[in-house]
Image (cartoon, helix red, strand yellow):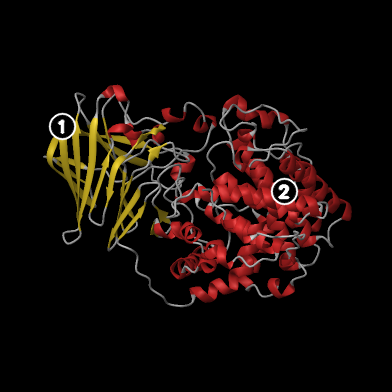
Amino acid sequence: MRSSIVESALLGIKGVKKVEFSSFSHNNRALWDSLDCFIKQDIRKRAEECHFSEKDAISLSLFRDFRKTGNRKRFEDVYFDKRKKLSDLVIAECVENSGSYIPEIEEGIWSIISEPSWVLPAHNSYIRDTPQLSTPLLCRPILDLFACETAEILALTALALEDSLDEVIVEDIYSEIRERITIPYITDHFWWMGGDGGLNNWSSWCTQNILIATLSNPLTTEKERMKIVKTAVNTLDLFLESYGEDGGCEEGAGYYHAAALTLFGSLLVLEKASSRDFSSVYRNSKIRNMASYIEDVFIADDLYLNYADCSPKAGTLTCREYLFARATGNEAMAHRAALDVARYGWREDDAPYNLFYKFLALSAYNDVMMEAGTVKTFERPSFKVFSKTGLAIWRKGDITFSLKGGNNAEGHNHNDVGSIILYKGSKPLLIDIGVETYTEKTFSPERYSLKPMRSSYHNLVNFPPYEEMAGAEYMARDAVMEESYLSLDLSHCYARESGISYVRKAYFDREKEEIAVEEIISSDIPPVLSLMSQEEPRIEAGVLNYPSFTVSFQKGFSGASVEVIKVDDQRLRKAWPERLFRTLVSLDGSARWVIGFK
């Protein structure tokens, strides 16, 4: 039976009102004047660096560069910089309320609405995971993540500064949003809306920004608003259905901000548009669990367990997480979000161009800082399991150990079923390196030729030339996940013809603070254990001696070698030093190894 959590909150609704977002207006002086001088100084400083010129124009050759070279960055640097500059200028004008930023804001608006299409070249296709068209088809706009987000930025710009902007430019904004977003949304169908396979973060992320842009648009009719809400509710409920009751995000910690958190953004807009009380929605156990997922996979500082296409530095918590935590009654998460804001600042570093997030952050800032000024302590659970995704997490003191089950067809999948991540405090010991800068190959049939996606670059046993395979049928079976004992049958993660039988078990001795891993193997192919680390080990007699920990083999060890991995990708370098290490341990059959801490 399909989920109807959001639909139930709107049963019997007779109409949907135009959403005003009046609290975001530059005329809301109670908000803007209440901000402390350091925030205002930061806002002014950022705005003073924002100028639009001819180099901000997007040419056809730049749009086609992705199809020609596979490079996403050259186009996206120009595209996102424009939107970030516009958002920064709008916030500065709301603070100053002097009109001094209006000319540059109007230049930014003109530059963006002059773009023939708002879709990214990497998303310019009508069918999911198919080759992109080299040229956008203007008569049938594609609603991708950032076309929708562009509309949100422009809509909130108009709403915040409507009485200060040239009235023709305001009309142009509303007209462009109607033609490029509203009409396609109510007349066309896109895969992320549901009905064409599994949904992911696109579903809630696009929906959030479409709701903001279309329900606030005076050109949207009452009949259209009802259709927009009906479509959005259907998508959001299908998105919720894709989650397990435990709220685990299969796309990983890095996508929480674009998934569960944009669901929250969608709910905020729907609540405002419908004049309904959504407190029952926020009390729903699945939504409460989805909200707390980012707290559950937290390690230390800005570090998180990072399976799938995620960096371990998955972003600090912000005012948005604070608001979501407050709505769902999660005191621990609300407090940590407030501490993160106090430590790292109010800005939305994961989406610095999104104007909605900036407005939410500044609107909640004073409350957040009051929370940050309190002293509270919360105990973290010693054991947590996400059954649908097969993620188990053990904690003891500052030790965080996780093992992932599931299958190899999850969102942003790596072939990593059975892999391990281990931290001591904020120190990474056994790691998942994450994903490199996105290119054309990242989301193509060649995806699993990339090293970070392969099981041989995760903390797993492989059987050269056999590695784990991609697909839903390549999965862990007979999972047992308990407080001190984990077991996964990984035999079905490899090609059937390999004849591999492989069960991985793990034990956590909390008194000794030792973790034992048992590899139960039956195979004619010599097994090789890969261990990924930031530290370089010394290979001794059956022992890998790392600076911060040891891996001691009680049986199965027949030799090891260490491979240096040079980290020169820009995205990976944000999380890792210049060198990482892959230790390849040759096994003579089944093995048992024990992790000890120094």
Classify 17 as above or below 566. below
Q: Where residue 351 appears, x then y in whole percent?
A: 59, 52
Specify the amino acid type for callout 2. Answer: Ala
Question: As drawn, which residue projects farthest toward the top?
Answer: 497
Secondary structure beneath dot 2 equals helix
Identity of the residue drawn at 76% across and 40% down: 54
* Residue denoted by label 2: 151
Q: Between residue 144 and residue 427, name the one nearer to us.
A: 144
Bin the neighbour count of mark 2 within 10 Å (Cα to Cα): few under 14, some 14-19, many 20 and up.
many
Q: Where residue 581 appears, x then y in whole percent?
A: 30, 39
Residue 196 in which image quadrant: top right
Q: Is residue 348 left or right of residue 503?
A: right
Q: Earlier in the sequence, mark 1 or mark 2?
A: 2
Bin the neighbour count of mark 1 within 10 Å (Cα to Cα): few under 14, some 14-19, many 20 and up.
some
Q: Is residue 246 visible?
A: yes
Question: As drawn, which residue projects farthest toward the right?
Answer: 168
Q: Which mark is residue 589?
A: 1
Q: Between residue 224 and residue 143, name the one nearer to us.
A: 224
Q: Is residue 597 visible?
A: no
Q: Which mark is residue 194?
A: none
